Image: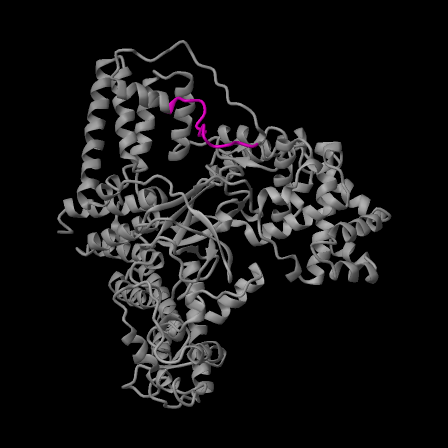
């Protein structure tokens, strides 16, 4: 790409740089005419599309090589590596359930498969299915001895299930949570933000606002070996490859055939289901042994079919360009003719072509040309390459870059000591704190989902089951009030100016939400220094913060209206940290960098910043030691002293302190000092509550760490912590809370085990 761009003459580069959305047909045609004269361009196209030169087609020699490598790994006892080459291993719970499903699709009355499935589901904490599995196994088992064994196993699992239900009432809350019908939202136009979504009625907290399947999606390159290329769920050990090319990996045969637009068929034996079984069991058997788990109401499109030629371009071109190719392929297949309909009018997405840099415009032109030529190998004359098709493709890629949603998965660092097949720890003292992050795994276009506007203080939350988008209200939203989610960092995560720059660079708009236009406590204290007066709790702003935050004071004279997530955080807290600044807004405004916004005392910012940087170097050493799990006494003591320095110079709610407390909590957990870990974890949570609000999901993620530390200590408050984080999850994920956070079930079980053993009362 860089070589091609360098070969474009300056005159043509300038024409492309000056282009707008209305003259793209002319500029793209001119560039296509020039590129067609270059032998290097045609060689690149051959490398991307020629089946003879492709690196992505199936290859018998390569398959034999992988088999030989797998055999070597297998005989050396390296089973995980062997499984990466061929799919065969015992003892994997999710894989066990899948293999049982395959067996039961062939023979629904196979008692051993039902028994194995029940044991695996019990180990996964999916007790309801486990009970049903063993109940079916008992009914279809022929021998009396076998029936007796299954009955004994069934009793144990029923007791375990009842035990987990007694730990807390979150599951009852979820079961009683009546999921409303999807709300009929309205698309309205705001003079500042353009199109947006509102509800004609009040929306209670935790209500499901919107559910949508993607118009098109693509897996990110970084996740090609770890997540299914169709549903985007994490890949099991026994992955299912594409039958025709070497690019995609799938979690199941269902995803494999759906991606190519095929139908699932399976061979069934004459072994049917006994008519004497209870109706509820017969319905359960039919559900499990169904050959297809697709939703009949969900449109399925063979998104990989046009790429599945063994060609190289889907693996080489950027993800957003490949996603544009999938949208074009879908449009052509549905409309049967690219020229007959207006693709851009069909999707109705916003675009910001004028805000793209000159170099970015040239890159878009070249990618559009390359993409259409690659697609033409699949669609032939149905996809003409001319100024019209090129201009629409250029705009389409620019639309994807500002409208596509990142499909994320929750990733956690699990326990240091994994639970056994019944979900119990052999030694709870070996447990390690869990941490949770959102990890982008895919990129998708949701036609209605793209209409929701942004706010750095959102009132709705988006999450994904498979690739289905769910949007839920995180607070009560009045009728007609904008429904807004976060496109990235929120108040309390990044400083205001950093958020503004990020959103402008990535989405080409200057955020004017209430979190960015009005003064709030989080933005003042997030990166602030502490007043030199020990009796003052005021903030001293860094040079990089004073302009953006003090300008809010100028624009909003008097005490601004405080908008926070936590109803218990009063405007008095803002007065405590910035009393002088608030007073001066009605008079002469002369607060300077280095001056306390509360009492006016001067701080030596240069010396304080030097001490901060030195302390953060010690904390970075601790972070590296946590990753390597090699924490020396020296590193730990140095980090503890560094925390003391940070607390002496930074404001008490500064996020650097919260991060330092969190790092020390993890470090003390690793060395087995769970009491110190608990104290540091609580200190971190206290700061996050001030920055985000006490019910924010970020606080819930930290409560996971705290609960595992408390369980390690046998702390009786562990159950309360688990209850609290469960309710936070319910607020953000509703009836999907336990499904989104499967390790919450593990925490519940372990708390119940401690209760039964008398270690927690």
Residue 600 x, y percent position in the rendering: 36, 89
The question of residue 702 being in magenta is answered with no
* Residue 437 point in image, percent of width and height: 42, 54
Q: How is the image coloured?
A: one colour
User: 325 left or right of 477?
Assistant: right
| Residue 504 pos. (x, y %) | 56, 64
Q: Is residue 495 above or below residue 243?
A: below
Q: Residue at x 39, y 25 (%)?
A: 100
- Left or right, 186 with reference to 726: right
Start-end of magenta stretch:
288-301
Most foreground residue, 214 or 650: 214
Residue at the (43%, 55%) spot, across then down: 485
Q: Nearer the viewer, residue 22 or 134?
A: 22
Pinpoint residue 201: horizontal percent, then vertical percent: 34, 49
In the rendered image, which quarter is residue 275 located in? top left
- The quadrant in which residue 709 appears is bottom left
Q: Residue furthest right?
A: 37
Question: Which secondary structure class fits the magenta region best?
Answer: loop
Of residues 336 and 37, the one nearer the viewer is: 336
Q: Is residue 647 above or below residue 197?
A: below
Q: Is residue 640 visible?
A: yes
Q: Is residue 92 visible?
A: no
Residue at 32% from the left image edge and 37% from the top image edge: 124
Report how many numbered discs are placed on residues in the image.
Answer: 0
Q: Nearer the viewer, residue 523 or 82?
A: 523
């Amino acid at each position: 790409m860089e070589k091609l761009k360098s070969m474009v003459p300056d005159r043509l580069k300038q024409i492309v740089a000056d282009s707008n959305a209305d003259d793209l047909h002319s500029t793209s045609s001119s560039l296509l005419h020039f590129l067609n004269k270059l032998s290097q361009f045609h060689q690149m196209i051959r490398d991307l599309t020629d089946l003879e030169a492709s690196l992505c087609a199936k290859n018998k020699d390569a398959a034999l090589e992988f088999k030989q490598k797998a055999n070597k790994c297998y005989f050396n006892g390296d089973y995980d590596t062997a499984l990466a080459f061929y799919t065969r291993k015992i003892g994997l719970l999710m894989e066990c359930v899948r293999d049982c499903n395959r067996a039961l699709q062939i023979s629904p009355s196979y008692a051993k498969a039902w028994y194995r499935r029940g044991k695996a589901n019990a180990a996964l904490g999916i007790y309801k299915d486990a009970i049903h599995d063993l109940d079916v196994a008992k009914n279809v088992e022929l021998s009396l001895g076998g029936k007796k064994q299954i009955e004994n196993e069934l009793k144990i699992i029923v007791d375990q299930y009842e035990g987990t239900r007694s730990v807390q009432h979150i599951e009852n809350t979820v079961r009683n949570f009546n999921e409303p019908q999807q709300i009929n939202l309205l698309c309205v136009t705001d003079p500042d933000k353009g199109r947006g979504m509102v509800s004609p009625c009040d929306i209670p907290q935790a209500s499901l606002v919107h559910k949508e399947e993607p118009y098109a999606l693509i897996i990110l390159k970084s996740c090609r070996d770890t997540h299914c290329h169709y549903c985007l769920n994490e890949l099991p050990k026994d992955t299912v490859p594409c039958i025709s090319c070497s690019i995609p990996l799938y979690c199941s045969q269902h995803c494999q055939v759906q991606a190519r637009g095929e139908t699932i068929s399976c061979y069934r034996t004459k072994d049917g289901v006994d008519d004497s079984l209870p109706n509820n069991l017969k319905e359960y058997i039919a559900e499990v042994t169904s050959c297809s788990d697709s939703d009949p109401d969900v449109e399925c499109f063979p998104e990989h079919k046009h790429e599945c030629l063994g060609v190289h371009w889907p693996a080489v071109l950027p993800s957003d360009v490949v996603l544009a190719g999938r949208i074009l392929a879908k449009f052509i297949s549905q409309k049967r003719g690219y020229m007959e309909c207006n693709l851009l009018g069909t999707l109705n997405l916003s675009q910001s072509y004028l805000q793209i840099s000159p170099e970015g415009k040239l890159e878009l032109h070249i990618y559009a040309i390359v993409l259409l030529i690659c697609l033409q190998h699949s669609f032939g004359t149905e996809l003409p390459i001319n100024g019209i098709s090129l201009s629409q493709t250029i705009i389409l890629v620019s639309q994807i870059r500002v409208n596509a949603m990142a499909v994320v998965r929750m990733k956690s660092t699990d326990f240091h000591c994994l639970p056994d097949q019944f979900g119990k720890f052999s030694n709870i003292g070996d447990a390690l704190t869990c941490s949770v992050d959102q990890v982008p795994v895919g990129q998708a276009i949701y036609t209605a989902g793209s209409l929701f506007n942004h706010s750095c203080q959102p009132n709705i939350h988006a999450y994904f089951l498979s690739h289905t988008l769910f949007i839920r209200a995180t607070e009560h939203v009045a009728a007609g009030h904008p429904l807004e989610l976060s496109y990235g960092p929120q108040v309390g995560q990044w400083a205001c100016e950093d958020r503004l720059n990020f959103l402008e660079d990535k989405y080409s708009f200057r955020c004017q939400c209430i979190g960015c236009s009005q003064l709030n406590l989080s933005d003042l204290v997030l990166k602030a220094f502490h007043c030199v007066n020990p009796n003052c709790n005021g903030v001293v702003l860094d040079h990089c913060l004073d302009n953006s935050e003090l300008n809010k004071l100028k624009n909003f004279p008097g005490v601004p209206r405080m908008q926070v997530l936590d109803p218990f955080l009063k405007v008095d807290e803002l007065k405590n940290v910035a009393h002088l600044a608030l007073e001066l807004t009605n008079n002469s405004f002369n607060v300077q960098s280095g001056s306390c916004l509360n009492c006016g005392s001067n701080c030596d910012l240069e010396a304080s910043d030097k001490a901060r940087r030195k302390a953060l170097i010690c904390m970075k050493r601790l972070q590296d030691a946590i990753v390597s799990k090699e924490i020396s006494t020296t590193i730990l003591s140095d980090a503890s002293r560094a925390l003391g320095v940070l607390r002496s110079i930074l404001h008490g709610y500064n996020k650097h302190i919260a991060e330092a407390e969190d790092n020390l909590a993890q470090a003390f957990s690793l060395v087995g000092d769970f009491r110190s870990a608990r104290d540091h974890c609580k200190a971190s949570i206290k700061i996050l509550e001030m920055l985000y609000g006490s019910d924010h999901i970020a606080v819930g993620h930290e409560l996971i760490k705290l609960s595992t530390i408390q369980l390690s200590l046998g702390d009786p408050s562990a159950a309360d912590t688990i209850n609290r984080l469960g309710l936070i999850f319910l607020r953000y994920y509703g009836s999907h809370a336990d499904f989104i956070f499967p390790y919450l079930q593990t925490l519940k079980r372990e708390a119940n085990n401690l209760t039964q053993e008398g270690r927690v009362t």
